[in-house]
Amino acid sequence: MIKAAIDARWAEEVGFLKALIRLPSDNPPGDTIAHAEETAKRLEALGFQVERHPVPEPFVKQHGMRNVTNLIVREKFGEGTGPTIALNAHGDAVPPGEGWTSDPYGGEEINGAIYGRGAAVSKSDFATYTFALLALKDTSDGLNGTVELHLTYDEEAGGFVGPRWLLEQGLSKPDYAISAGFSHAVTTAHNGCLHLEIVIRGRQAHAATPENGADALEAATPVLAALYEERKRLHKIKSETPGIGSPQLTVGLIEGGINTNVVPDRVTLRVDRRLIPEEDGDAAEEALKDLIETAAPDHESLEVECRRIMLADPMRPISGTERLAEVVKHHAGEVLCEDVRDTGIPLYTDARHYTQVGIPTVLYGAGPRSIAEANAHGADEHIMLADLRAATEVITLTLKDMLSG
C-alpha cells in the first residue's frame, strides 16, 4: 500500500522539488523569506495546515542573515498520544559559484537526476518528508502519534535561528527527530566546528623606514607556522566513530595591509577547526587561543585578539538514538537491497540542536553514498531520482513503525 501511495504522487513529488530548486534561497546573503512563503503555499495546496514562524530581525541579523521564516506542519494520527516525530530539512543553500554545465536554478532532469543548487542539500528532503507524510496519511490505519515537518532556513549559518530557535521558543517538543541526510547510510554522529577570528595589530610606517613600525604581517608568520604544526598534530588523532576521521584545522581567510609601501598595521586570519565527537568545543577553543598567544611575538607595539565567530558542537548519539537508527536501517536495507549501516560524517549540521536538548536524532534522507557523489556545495549539484524515491519509502515505513508502537 505504501509503494502504491508514493507511486500515485510521484510525478507531483518530482515537480515539487523542481519548483523549490527554481526559486533561489542562497545563504549568504540569507534572504529566504520568499522561498519559505512559496513552500508554505505549495504545502497548503497539498492539504496541509502550515504554521509560519518569522524570527525577529535583530536575532536573524546577529547570525549574519537578512530574514528567516521557519515552517511547521503538524499531523496527528489516532489519538495523538503516541510519539511525536520531527522531520527537519533546510531550504537555504550556498550560492552556486562557477563551473556549472546546467542552470543552477533550472531544476533540470538529466539522465535520471535533478540538477540545481540545493537539490541534494537539502531541498530534496523537503520533498522526501512532505510526500512521505502524504503517503502515511493515505495508509494511516492503526497509527497513534504526531509527525511534524520542521522546514527551516539557516543551516548554512549554523541552525541557531532555525531548529534551535523553534526548540528554545517551545514551538515543538518532539520525542524523536530525523534530519536531512543520504539514503545509503544512517548518520548518528557528526563533527563540530569552531570558527575563530585572529586579529594581529601592529603599527604602520613607511616602507623606507620599517623599523619605525610594528609589522603585523611579520608577527602573523609564527602564528601561521604554529597553526600548521597543530594541523599536523591533529591529523594523527583518529575518532573512534566510523566515518569521522581526524580533527581538522584550516586557515581559510587572510586579510591585511594598507599598501605595498606601508608596513602593515593589521592582519586578520579566519580559522576553521573541525571537532570530532570525542572533543569538547570550549576546551578546544581555549587550547587554540593559548597556542596562538604563545606563538605571537612579545612586543609592546603588537596586540593579538582572538574572537569566536561560531561554535557548533559535535552531534553524539544519546539514549534512544539506537532504537530510531535500527528502524531506519531495517527499512533502508530492505528498500535498497543492501546492508545499510549507521555511521558518522565529518561535517556539522543543524541536527545537533535536537540531540543537545535530549531528542534522539538521526540523519536520513535522499542522496547517494557521499556528498562528493552529489556534488553538494559544488557545481552541478544533483539528486538521483532513484534515491529520492527510495528515501521517501524508507521514511514512510519508519514513521509507520514508530507510530505503531
Image: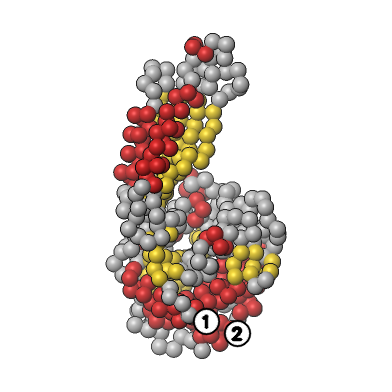
Give whichever of 345, 63 is nearer the camera: 345
Instruction: Classify 220 as above or below 276.
Output: above
Q: Amino acid at mark 1?
A: Ala
Q: With 259 as the anchor, is 326 left or right in this view?
A: left
Q: Amino acid at mark 2?
A: Ala
Q: Whole-percent x and y of residue 191?
A: 40, 54
Q: Quadrant of the C terminus?
A: bottom left
Q: Is residue 117 above or below residue 175?
A: above
Image location (x, y in percent) of residue 224: 45, 33
In the rendered view, does 137 fall on the left or right side of 243?
A: right
Q: How many neighbours does mark 1 have within 10 angstroms: few (below 14), some (14-19), or many (20 or more)?
A: many
Q: Along the polypeptide, which appears first: circle 1 or circle 2?
A: 2
Give the residue at x 61% y 52%: 95
Residue at 43%, 56% (x, y): give it. Answer: 346
Residue 385 is tagged as none
- Tally of numbered discs: 2
Label 1 sits on a secondary structure element that is helix
Q: Which residue is mark 1?
A: 135
Q: Circle 2 is placed at which residue position?
A: 8
